[in-house]
Amino acid sequence: MAGSVPPAGDELTPERRDEIIDWIVERAARGGLITPAMLLIEAHRPLSFIGSQAVHFFSPVIGAIVDPRRVDELALLMENRDNIDLLVDRLQERLDQDQARRPPRPRQTRGWRGFLARLLGSSSRDPGGDPPTPPAP
């Protein structure tokens, strides 16, 4: 029956688990939501098992919208806290990779000095530099 609770002992294979985790990480990275995803997962870690049971309970309703097998796989993924740890680790790895690829941003002076430096056009690294020279007529 579609959306029914999987039989006891039904578990994800490690390959399928990794595919699901990689899919979640890619979706979070594509949306630029890795850090919020990590925060949400870490904050709700103690409730992961209860959440998985809620997904099992609502799977008939959710299964009408989404593929019921995916709903059951998500619930199975959430049941095991080791999978949650693995997901957070993969999100952290992806965040580190993205930050390593990103070029370093120039340091900007903050506060009113930075505002005046940007307003007057001097370099953000040297807010006390000479004022810009007007163009020759």
Image: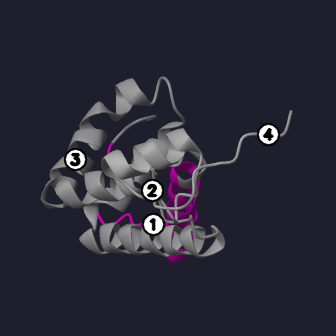
The image shows residue 3 at horizontal and vertical percentages of 40, 36
Q: Earlier in the sequence, mark 3 or mark 2?
A: 2
Residue 122 in view of the camera: yes
98 with respect to 93 (left or right): right
Q: Nearer the viewer, mark 1 or mark 4?
A: 4
Which residue is found at the position 22% from the left and 47% from the top? 51
Q: Is residue 8 magenta?
A: yes
Q: Name the residue under label 3.
A: 51
Q: Report the quarter where the C terminus lies.
A: top right
Q: Do labels 2 and 1 touch, CB within 8 Å?
A: yes
Q: Name the residue under label 4.
A: 135
In the rendered view, would you say 109 is above or below 60?
below
Please state which amino acid type lies under the numbered disc 3: Gly
Q: Which of marks 1 and 3 is nearer the N terminus?
A: 3
Q: Which of marks 3 and 2 is in front?
A: 2
For residue 34, the mark is 2
Q: Which of marks 4 and 3 is nearer the N terminus?
A: 3
Mark 2 Cα-neighbour bin, 10 Å: few <14, some 14–19, many ≥20: many
